Image: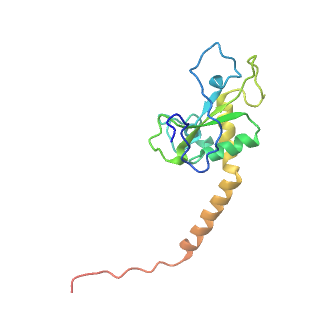
Amino acid sequence: MNPLAPVQPGHPHYQHRPVLQLGPFNKTKTHDDPERWVCVYPAYINKNKSLKEGRRIPKEKGVDTPTYQDIKMVLDEAKVEYILERKFYPRERSKEPNYIGRFKVHLKDKEGEFIRDDFQSRDQILLYLGEKIPILKSRTTMQAKVSTTEAPQASSGAVPKKKKGKK
């Protein structure tokens, strides 16, 4: 194995794209350079997290444990240019594959003008994600399966166990 070869992603759903070598932030770079794009982590819209843990939007507008696949689907549907990086949010305690993913979202063109009128800040993107992720087909079918499996269990009568005691 070549030690200089890029590290292969461990998650099977991760798209294999050429790894861009992003440098440090520099004010001389234009807004078209990926270093100047806006970062979005799944933790920013996770309603189960506190503000200290990294949530950036109100709980009412957050999503229950969003994944990078959910964010990717919404951004693809909105036709927003982004780069998905295999990074974890620094405050994330769990290193499971569900929590992976940093999105660099392209907001401004070379002159600093917004590319889209509906996305003019990171907060607008986060609120859009919080609004669209719950209505994704993958989310709605998963919730339907959960509700159908819980319904029969609740209706069945529970048989009390016999108590074991001394004779």
Out of 69 and 148, give the one closest to the viewer: 69
In the displayed structure, 143 sits above or below 75; it is: below
Name which residue lies at 75% across and 22% down. 109
Quadrant in which the C terminus is drawn: bottom left
Q: Is residue 96 left or right of residue 165?
A: right
Q: Position of residue 42 (x, y in %)?
A: 58, 40
Out of 3 and 158, give the one closest to the viewer: 3
The colour scheme applied to this rendered structure is: rainbow
List the single residue furthest toward the bottom. Answer: 167
Name which residue lies at 70% across and 50% down. 135
Answer with the quarter of the image where residue 156 lies.
Answer: bottom right
Out of 71 and 54, give the one closest to the viewer: 71
Name which residue lies at 54% across and 72% down. 153
Q: Position of residue 158 (x, y in %)?
A: 47, 78
In the displayed structure, 118 sits above or below 42; it is: above
Q: Position of residue 122 (x, y in %)?
A: 65, 29
In the displayed structure, 47 sits above or below 35; it is: below
Name which residue lies at 62% across and 68% down. 148
List the single residue furthest toward the left. Answer: 167
Count of numbered circles in the view: 0
List the single residue furthest toward the front. Answer: 1
Answer with the quarter of the image where residue 145 lies.
Answer: bottom right
